[in-house]
Image: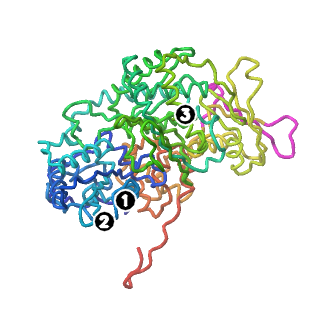
Amino acid sequence: MNHLPQPAPLPTDITRSGPLTWIQQWHWFEHTIPAARRVNPTPLADHCHVPASATVADVLAALASLTARHEALRTTVDPLRPVQHVHPAHWAPLPVDYVDVLDAEAETLETATAALAARPIDAERNPPWLARVLLAGGKPRAVLIAAHHVLIDGWGLAVLINQLHHQLRGGDAPLEGGPHPLDMAATQPLERARVAEREWLTRLAGNPTGVLAPFGGTPDGAGRHRLQHRSVDAYADLDRLAHRHGASPEVVLLAALAHDIAARTGEHRFLASVVVSNRARADLRNSIGVRALTVPVQIDLRPGAAFGEVVASVAASSAAAYRHGQWRPAELVAAQARMDRRRGVVTVPTIEYNCYAWPRDYLVPAQYAPPGGSATWSTSAPDEPCETLYVDLGRDEGVVTLDVTVGDHLLDAGQAMALPVRLCGLLRTLADGDECPVPQRPPTPAAPGWWRALQGWVRLSDVEDVLRGHPGVHDVTAAPSGEAAEQGEEPRLVAQVLVDPGVTSDDLHRHVLDHLGEVPGLMAPGRYVLTAIAHQPPRPRGQLRLGTDDTASRPIPPRPPATRAERALAAAVAAVAPGGPSDGTPDSPDTVDMSRCLADHGVTLVAIPQLLALLHQFGFAGIASDELAGTASLGHLATALEPLPPRAPRGGEASP
């Protein structure tokens, strides 16, 4: 009988173990996503220069001291369960190597840091970090550190780098390194977490998404742009505005970004996903463990409001978001997936706003401008499109640095480079006394081929392409319904679909739902009505109406697994679902509804590695972990499963 693979016996040198915290669980799941699809850079990497008086022995002594002080540097993660293990200080050799370089200039550091970040870190068996000493002429010139995101976050890496540099300069070492995440696990207020989940799901349910899409760049979304803009003037402007409005510079910049989005798109209600350090308490400031979290800030702007009112609104929304930060990410993501499937839209935050730029070595400008000026650096890589606009704010040594990451289908390279320049220009105008009221409507109409539904923006060509991909569909024409607007009803999108006999509305409904997580310009609300036209052409021609009239919606009938791949996936889902059997076989069960997504069955993120391991035991592979976390139905996912190739006999033994 097939069983779940059992975790390896625990080493005898573990001092204590416990669950991953509510923040770490997200990064634990994120690390199972293929590297090309990850949002955050994992592992993180940064560097510090070595003072001229320091030796290699000093570097090793400082790293050993930091390892003894910070338990996160000697913590490993269980491969199948969200559990972490803390080891003693001398549990493993320092993960340090050495590289000879000609100099330690910015370009050298950029290349070396990127190379170290690309090295895999086995946080299941080894220390969750790597260090590399750059030697020039036999003397240490810089120390690079890469860290696994499950155990050390971006702020934690900055704390670690600062403490390392402080010790290399001869400073006194801190007496303690701050609480380990295990120290905080027992203090999680679960009832508060449940209240936060309910509140944010309610807010997200009525929040428009994707408002930047129809104002974007190239339609094919072929790449991703990253750029950095630096401005000395914006630093002073931010301080003046923060003092004037009684808010932090970070809130002022978020308000300016929200103002810019409203001016460009005409949307006055949208979502910002804001990353905060979560280190407000004094005892957490020296902690290098994972504390930073992302909170959804729902922004509501009043048309015609002066900028001071915008700042006050953003500040209030941010404060409300921070108060509800301790939700359980696995359960929240699963609940949100269920909600998204019901209302027929994949929630993608309008903007991701990070009040701390990721390590700058990833985004070093081509050339630094003289003091008081600015520099930009941009590139486009042929990776998957970036569906969200990411803006990172850094304030260092009197310079404001704005890092922007965005996909072609949202903003092309020129538009991406214009965004930080426009933001800095807005700050200057505001600092000079202009109130810059929020525009009533966008200055330009939406781009051709887009339609605004209550749930978000829809690209008509994407709807047509997805429907054409269904077997038995010969032609599709999608257009907004003029009748609904004339009769004062909710706007509808009507798709004229030419189909073979036997293709039903349920088939098309399920097909569109299966592609929600794959096509950013696709929206599928709750109403799908396919009716034959009276005059009966050679092939039936139907209408697929997309609306939100629940009285007309027809639920998709449950469908049991049919193929061998579907039965294997159903058995794995039943085994990891709450209250399911402890194990399963590829021939059971028949009670799993293949027309529903994984979240509909109550499976959360922390169970996905076990589910993938079970599929492997049953002889199947081909599904990525992030696909399981989406809104695609189990039937759609099962089509991607592929039988594992038979293993060649070894040593005369028959293959299992």
Secondary element under disc 3, as helix, strand or loop, is helix
- State the residue at coordinates (26%, 47%): 161
Q: Amino acid at mark 3?
A: Arg
Secondary element under disc 1, as helix, strand or loop, is helix
Range drawn in magenta? 532-555
**Residue pointed to by mark 2:** 99
Q: Position of residue 25 (x, y in %)?
A: 34, 44
Quadrant of the image for the C terminus? bottom left
Q: Please indicate whether residue 232 sits to the left or right of residue 558 in the image.
A: left
Q: Amino acid at mark 1?
A: Ala
- State the residue at coordinates (56%, 54%): 382
For residue 342, the mark is 3
Q: Closest to the observer: 581 or 257?
A: 257
The colour scheme is: rainbow
Tags 1 and 2 touching, CB below 8 Å: yes
For residue 112, the mark is 1
Q: Closest to the observer: 328 or 51?
A: 51
Q: CA distance from mark 1 to mark 2?
A: 9 Å
Q: Position of residue 18 (x, y in %)?
A: 22, 46
